[in-house]
Image (tube, coloured by chain):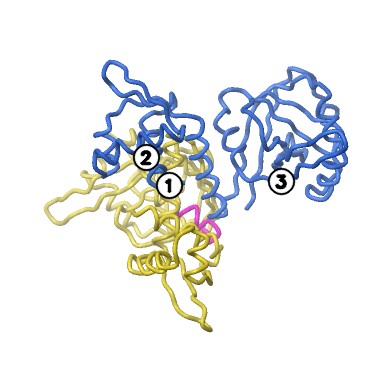
Chain colours: A yellow, B blue
Amino acid sequence: MNETLYSAIKELKNLAGSKNIAYISSSELARKMGVSQQTASRIILELIKEKYIDRTIENRRQKIMIQEKALDLLYRELNELYSILKINQSFEMEGTVQNGLGEGKYYISKKGYMDQFKEKLKMEPFPGTLNIKINPEYENILRQVRGADGIIISGFKDRERTFGGVKCFNAHIDGIKCYLIFPERSVYTDIIEVISDKYLRQALSLKDGDIIKVNVDFEF
Amino acid sequence: MNETLYSAIKELKNLAGSKNIAYISSSELARKMGVSQQTASRIILELIKEKYIDRTIENRRQKIMIQEKALDLLYRELNELYSILKINQSFEMEGTVQNGLGEGKYYISKKGYMDQFKEKLKMEPFPGTLNIKINPEYENILRQVRGADGIIISGFKDRERTFGGVKCFNAHIDGIKCYLIFPERSVYTDIIEVISDKYLRQALSLKDGDIIKVNVDFEF
């Protein structure tokens, strides 16, 4: 990542606020960044090309729309600083218990995954996942968690097909130790999957539609 | 701040760990940063010149010592990301109640400060400060707080002398709203000063040597 682009993304996101929309001319960006207007125009074109921002002209003003890729970049930088500075963090998110489709059980039970869970998470997970739909107001925390380095469970092949890698994060729900698991390659979703050595639905007396809090713990 | 230096500082601090000492050759740094060895050597010289790091040669190895200025830089970047991403944070620190010298009362009572406290903090502080010596294990949190943007109380002159600016931070102790105040120009100290519209010693039944927790609240 080009560091000038990083600085520009910070400036633009700062102006854009939570709506992720900023109205700014290249000359204003140039002034804020302490570069020439030519350089600022070039930076904006580069950011568009790299899909960090999108741009339209509205009433003769340049409208910059911050894209998901730029937010990911900023949260990754934040996570990197946490890691470098050894800042432990616990993130709380709230969500609603979802009806599982039994898919989790199929995946968890695969030997290629199970052996790694035992080795890397030091536990034998209950064969199934608790699915939680995270409330929209925790979107940014979810983005930050997703962008962090987790415990990596590698992908593998069996006779039938290929299984992708999974990233796990230490977490707890109501004092019960568990892990968030994310497919390494996944499109954005607000549903998270949780595994534990306990049958969480039973241990926490949960039913579909219940609202619960999940705490994700980062220790460096 | 040159962004290449920032990247180099991150690499070096990451290697240095909590002892802030790293053994690394210029060629290793070059490889990690994806730059030429010449560039890496130049970066190291620049970091020494700017007092971000110090260097000695020990048993033919280059010993890099991370300096306070580099740590400040990293914590400032962290704070900037909190501000840009509107991440509210509360930092807890523990410390010991100190014997005050009555100095705080002298300063707080000055009209030049008092008028600004009323206007900017929306309260009339009790004329005196509660001094707390922060435990060493909270040193990094204190560093981060000190490096953040606070509520600025400007310096002023009266007939006798000049009074420096002060930076205030929202905080609370045992549920009582208060403010940490830092002289804008101060050498590093592990003693913090707290003001409140209440006489904190009385309100919290504190005596010298008591151990208490302070929470500093950042809202963006």
Give A217 or B215, whichever is nearer the viewer.
B215
| Residue type, label 1 | Asn
Q: Position of residue B142 (x, y in %)?
A: 60, 32
| Residue type, label 2 | Ala
Check if mark 1's residue and mark 2's residue have beta carbons within 8 Å: no
Q: Secondary structure at mark 1?
A: loop
Q: Is residue B16 magenta?
A: no
Q: Which mark is residue B8?
A: 2
| Residue type, label 3 | Ile
Kindly indicate the quadrant of the structure image that contains residue A45: bottom left
> In 3D space, how far apart are the residues under numbered discs 2 and 3 (Cα atoms)?
32 Å
| In the depicted structure, whether residue B55 falls above or below residue B182 | above
Q: Position of residue A116 (x, y in %)?
A: 26, 39
| In the depicted structure, whether residue A161 falls above or below residue B172 | below
Residue A98 is left or right of residue A114, and the answer is right
Give B10 or B139, whichever is nearer the viewer.
B10
Q: Nearer the viewer, mark 1 or mark 3?
A: 1
Specify few, some or many for label 2: CA neighbours under 10 Å numbering under 14, 14-19, or 20 or more.
some
Lower sequence index among marks 1 and 2: 1
Q: Which mark is residue B2?
A: 1
**Pointer 3: what residue?**
B152
Residue B57 is left or right of residue A34, and the answer is left
Q: Secondary structure at mark 3?
A: strand
Specify few, some or many for label 1: CA neighbours under 10 Å numbering under 14, 14-19, or 20 or more.
few
Label 1 is found on which chain of the structure? B
Magenta segment range?
Answer: A134-143
Residue at image coords 54%, 67%:
A19
Q: Is residue B41 visible?
A: yes
